[in-house]
Amino acid sequence: MSDCKKCQSLFLEAFYEEMNPEQEQFFKDHLLVCEKCKSKFEEMKSTLQFMGKRVRPEPGKIFWDLYEERLAQRIEKEEILQPERESWQKRFARTFTFVPKWAYQAAAALVLIVVGIFIGRMVFMPPAQEIQKASTQPGLTTPQQQGTALVHRTQSYIERSKLILLALVNFDPATEDPYALDLPYQQQMSKELVQEASYLKRELAESNQERLENLIIDLERVLLQIANLESQNDFEAIELVKEGVTSRGILMEINLTDLRRSVRRGKSPISPEQPSPKSQTH
Amino acid sequence: MYSSNRGKKEMQPNEQILVDRFCGGDHTAFHELVGQYKKKIYFLAYDITGDHHEAEDISQEVFIKMFRSLKNFRRDAKMSSWLYQITVNASIDSLRKKSSKPKRSIDEFEQINIQEQLLGGTVQSLDPQRSTESSQIQNHISQALQKISPKERTVFVMRHYNDLKLNEIAEILNVTIGTVKSLLFRAIKKLRKELSSYMGNPVMEVPNE
């Protein structure tokens, strides 16, 4: 730092007499040899001296005599308000001091559980749209499932009817014992199947499964004939039933139905029976 | 604006006794402390704000804070620095709040008071022309002080009118002495410019700090 800069940095200390003896000596010596710094210092000094002419307005004796009284009043006023605030805080603190610690812990645990349940419901519950959709389908039977159940029942019906028909068709009175046919059992089963057919037909008609409906109608007729057989020795009547089965091609239709079903099962094992082309033309 | 100050100088022994007495429940000790500082605090607030009513209000706020905090007052801190610090912060806050309001160059109270003081019962000051001239100078000085920034004014009035040393100002404002000197140089330069008609000389070149 040059002497001028050093000297000028001491202007304030010089004016306000805050220099140490060493600084003072340097300052005096420099001003003796540097007119520029001396002039600058005089300028600053004159400004500060002019500012020293400022007269602070004195508030007066009365102001100062009453100052502490006014202060005391203000403190009193603010201290009156303060205890009210404190008493409210203390009251609040006191109320909660009597509550045992375990109550806070239990309350905190309860809050955590409620929050957990709420979060769980929010995260894991399926969207409302899906719930609404499920509620419109009572139980587990959707239209698709209902169709599949009908197909299974129809198949079961056909299987049971087929067994009766095969037993009857394959019976040869010339070579076989008539009791081996067990006609009473076959008749009983036929009666049950005829009763079942009345419901099944209606359901198949409703679901537009005409081919199966027709098969069931044919089976119903044959089974009714079997159920109405008077005696297991009435071979002529048995032969008429056998002819009816053969003439209507019922067993062939059953086999075709099985074939269609096995083909369809290769694509979709539980798909419902599609309406026949004939029914679609209606 | 200014962060809290950590006093480096201990309280004066008599102040320590007064604080101890107050902590012991003797409220007269508080009144003694108020008596000791009320003028210093009031005038510092007045010098910064330029408003008598504001200065009284600020000074009372400072003593209310002192009343509430005296029991927790650190013994290693200097009481005057602490009080000045509160005063400066309150005064600058007050200026900030009032910045949108129109400024008064000099209030009625000040005008009357200055004239009374200038008259002072002396023969010379009874000269009406001289009195008017002095009153004008006072008005111009007050206006010039209000034209410099609050920071510059604070530092200037602390040193020039409240007799606080440079290192004390730095301690109160929690800044370096270099910053204090820089603010002072800037304030003086601006004041000289504002009052150039009285100076009769071109604006001085203030040394760069």
Image (cartoon, grey):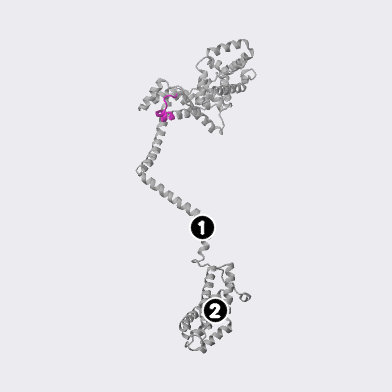
Q: Secondary structure at mark 1?
A: loop
Q: Which residues are magenta?
A: B64-77
Q: Are marks 2 and 1 in contact (CB under 8 Å)?
A: no
User: Residue reaching furthest front?
Assistant: A175
**Mark 2 nearby-residue class (10 Å; few <14, some 14–19, many ≥20):** many
The percent position of residue A150, horizontal first and vertical second, equals 53, 72
Q: Earlier in the sequence, mark 2 or mark 1?
A: 1
The percent position of residue A158, horizontal first and vertical second, equals 53, 77
Q: Which mark is residue B36?
A: none
- In the picture of the structure, the residue carrying the numbered disc 1 is A126
Front residue (pair B59, B89): B89
**Mark 1 nearby-residue class (10 Å; few <14, some 14–19, many ≥20):** few
The percent position of residue A89, horizontal first and vertical second, equals 39, 39
- In the picture of the structure, the residue carrying the numbered disc 2 is A216
Q: Quadrant of residue A246?
A: bottom right
Residue B143 appearing in the image: yes
